[in-house]
Image: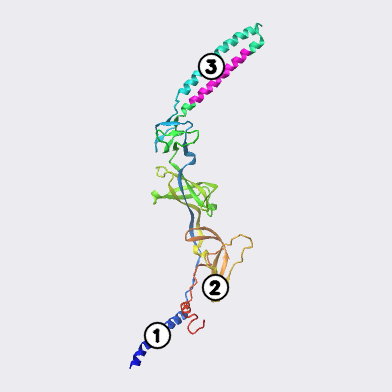
Amino acid sequence: MRLEMLLKPYVLITLVFITGLTAFGIKTFIARTKKQPVPYTTEKAKRRNIVQYITASGTVKAKTKDQISIGSLAAGKVEKLLADDNDVVKKNQILAILDNGIGKNGINLAAAQLEQAKAQLTYQERFLKRQKALFEAEELAENAYDLVILQHAQATGKVKELEANLAIEQRKYEDLFIRAPEDGTITARKIELGQMITSQFDAKVLFEEVKDLTAMEVWADVDEADIGLVKDGQEARFTVDTYANREFKSKIRLIQFNAKIVDNAITYAAVLSAANPNIELRPGMTANVDIKVAERKEALCVPYSAQRINILQLEEYSKKNNLTCTKIAASSQPGKRIESLWIFENNSFKQIPVTFGARDNSFIEVFEGLSETQNVVTKFLLITDNSSALKSMFGGGIGGSK
């Protein structure tokens, strides 16, 4: 009796193991005999309209020719500020006045010196006239007459020198008045009342002015992989964070040749024109740009996934299922990349050379090399054999050897 009680748990465990193993074996047998799903899909190319965009990020700026940095030719203390941020100003309007500690005194001194020189010149002119009469009457030696001529010339030169000096002093005084060079809007005042301006040593910007804020630009950084697709005059659209749900229309105006390198990434600036009639765009805003680089009507297209077929898996599947798999020969030209698609016909996979055109996020245009009647392999995913789980448990299958 006691022996039977000891044996019952082992019998129960054995029965459970045998039952589970039998069920697993039946499931495996059914899985093996069940028809496996085809790991690929095919479809014919279709005609559709396709538009290709490339993306870039950039910055909203005023037009380069409309941006003016206003500095000072004079040194001095800011005595008066007559303009501030966002002020609309007219050409020659005074924005600020500097005090150099001299003011008009330099002009007054130069003017007084000029008056003295003019008086001396007047005297020399009269003296020359009298001496000339004496010389012609042979009552004055030639050397004495030449000296009078020299003195007259020196007096004439002195007047011209002091006239120029007076003009310089007047210009220096005028430079104390910082004026708007053009009609426009002050976008930044960079000085404060009482600040010292030392223009001789530091070319400081006092004001930033933009002539026209109704016409802006976007400077977009285009990746080097995409820059070859960008052309002058192409249409573009962009958004800025403050108007996230609104698109602004623009066009490519200029593509710079100079590269910008940041963290080993190379980009080129594409300059887009952007109308801003309501002054909604502000300099410095970040722009997210889409540039239309290609547009095709009724183009022959296949899904984008068709150019991403795993060739090794396709060859493995073909070998296991006695299907033909024909690849195209590699290019004999070094560095030349062959574009291709896989088609399936007459129980055979065949790689064919094609030429791709425009593309979007879902489809790609096949420019040449494909007809509308051919079945294109658009997806291929090799399905793992159901017996793999069993093999991993028993090392080689039931009753098999490792």
Q: Residue at x 52, y 23 (%)?
A: 165
In the orientation shown, which residue stands out farthest toward the bottom? 1
Q: Residue at x 39, y 48 (%)?
A: 242
User: In this rendering, does residue 119 appear at all?
Assistant: yes
Tell me the quadrant of the picture where the N terminus can be found: bottom left
Q: Mark 3: which secondary structure?
A: helix
- Alpha carbons under labels 2 and 1: distance apart: 36 Å
The residue identified by callout 1 is: 19
Using the image, tell me which numbered label, if any, was put on residue 117. 3
Give the magenta-colored segment's residue range: 147-170
Q: Is 55 or 371 nearer to us in this picture? A: 55
Picture coordinates of residue 104 (x, y %)? Answer: 45, 23
The residue identified by callout 2 is: 316
Q: Residues within 10 Å of mark 3 (few under 14, many from 20)?
A: many
Picture coordinates of residue 373 (x, y %)? Answer: 53, 66
Horizontal side of residue 146 vs 61, given as left or right? right
Residue 402 part of the magenta-drawn span = no
- Asked whether the beta carbons under mark 2 and mark 3 sit within 8 Å of each other, the answer is no
Picture coordinates of residue 277 (x, y %)? Answer: 41, 42
Compared with 18, 174 (above or below) is above
Q: Is 268 or 235 nearer to us in this picture? A: 268
The three-letter amino acid code for the residue at tag 1 is Thr
Q: Residues within 10 Å of mark 1 (few under 14, many from 20)?
A: few
The three-letter amino acid code for the residue at tag 2 is Glu
User: In this rendering, does residue 94 appear at all?
Assistant: no
- Asked whether the beta carbons under mark 3 and mark 1 sit within 8 Å of each other, the answer is no
